[in-house]
Image (spheres, rainbow, N blue to C red):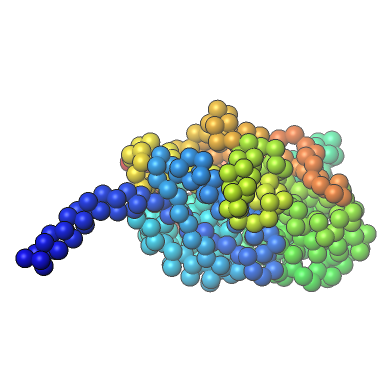
Amino acid sequence: MKTFIACAALAALQLFAAPAAVAQAKEQFFPLLVYRTGPYSPNGTPWANGKQDYIKLINARDGGVNGVKLTYEECETGYATDKGVECYERLKGKGQFGATLFDPQATGITFALTDKVPHDKIPLVTLGYGLSASADGGVFAWNFPLMGSYWTAADVLIQHLGKKEGGLDKLRGKKIALVYHDSPFGKEPIPLLEERSKMHGFELVKIPVTAPGVEQKSAWLEVRKQRPDYVLLWGWGVMNSTALKEAQATGYPREKMYGVWWSGAEPDVKDVGEGAKGYNALNLNTSGQSPKVIQDILKLVHDKGQGTGPRDEVGSVLYTRGLVIQALAVEGVRRAQERFGKGKVMTGEQVRWGLENLALDDKKLAALGLTGVIRPISTSCYDHQGSTWVRVHTWDGKQWAFSSDWYQADEQIIKPMVKAAADKYASEKKLTRRTPAECQS
């Protein structure tokens, strides 16, 4: 009888515990691929910290997304493609319905995962990097190069140089050198620059730098030999500061150097200081600690002793970019819940729909505390990029300051290139374009 009573009591306990267990299971899992070690860690670390702190903010400030707590697990890639794929395979099945989405944090890893995610039905968010052609959601159904690609970056840089010269026609006869990381990342802008070169009659000189870029003497000897009117820097990590030091050593004017948005953050210039004065780079987002979302993180995360990295890093260029990436990922979940059920954990497939239906206007950005941090962005089934707004900022020897108005990439040039590249990819992979009916499902 005692055994029977004990078993009955245990069964009753389990019965009452079941709803609590279900409630605790309402967690949206975000795998976080990072590189906190190796030559790219000075840039990869603030990016990773911004993502983590934003997740902590949403849990602390909002209690998650409509009651669904956000969870995460980091996996160190060292920026290596093979390790990135290993991390993907290890984390993709975690969480109630598997991984929400992946931000690979590297173009090489993105290339490797692009063929995997359609089978696993997990979105790839590659904000400002990855495959430029993946803006075409009709072919790249799972890739989201939100806010810009390397083609939009290259296009805006040429627009800016044309404006400085008094018109794009004034670029005829000029020489523009591309000093680039010899990897898929560094090679991505070349098709766009070659197209613009044909249009405007400037000479494009391509100067590769072997990764990670700690040795660039031969590259800058080539720059000195070629004497270009401008240098475009497509670097990452230690390559950027090394390039600026070599430019200083060879006497190339830093004010004639323009970096992509991954070559224009604090780690790129702080060790060069005054030697980098006048250097310019693109930036997709603002920086500094004045935005409301940054103030919320300082108050609700760092002041509570829950910050991921140092307090004075909060609001830096790459920290803020990581925050923005995570914010758009969370909004993909929130948007998916509006269709598939508020307060429910979303699958990767449902989150894809959310990412394809982002509609963040000024009012929604204000509600998120993102006013001034980014411009409004809206996406669709066929447009997985949603925005191409970008500005130039310049290093004054101590800090970055914006030095241009907002630019947008020229869609008349880029859209045909994106479609042609996407069609070529579809042909090679034997894919068919998504139909309107598939987009509405």
Q: Nearer the viewer, residue 49 or 349?
A: 49
Expressed as whole percent of the image width and height from the top left, the position of residue 324 reads: 59, 45
Expressed as whole percent of the image width and height from the top left, the position of residue 434 reads: 39, 46
Q: Residue furthest top?
A: 363
74 sits to left or right of 49: left
Q: Residue furthest front?
A: 2
Quadrant position of the N terminus in the picture: bottom left
Q: Residue furthest left?
A: 1
Residue 15 visible, this orientation:
yes
Query: At 54% from the left edge and 39% from the top edge, which residue is drawn?
Result: 386
Query: At 78% from the left edge and 39% from the top edge, which residue is drawn?
Result: 402
Query: At 75% from the left edge and 42% from the top edge, which residue is drawn?
Result: 392
Q: Nearer the viewer, residue 111 or 312?
A: 312
Q: Nearer the viewer, residue 28 or 217?
A: 28
Expressed as whole percent of the image width and height from the top left, the position of residue 145 reads: 55, 49
Query: At 70% from the left edge and 37% from the top edge, which residue is drawn?
Result: 290
Quadrant position of the C terminus in the picture: top left
Indicate the quadrant where residue 210 lies: bottom right
Q: How many marks?
A: 0
Residue 431 visible, this orientation:
no
Q: 178 above or below 365?
A: below
303 sits to left or right of 393: left
407 sits to left or right of 308: right
329 sits to left or right of 177: left
Q: Nearer the viewer, residue 244 or 341?
A: 341
Q: 167 above or below 85?
A: above
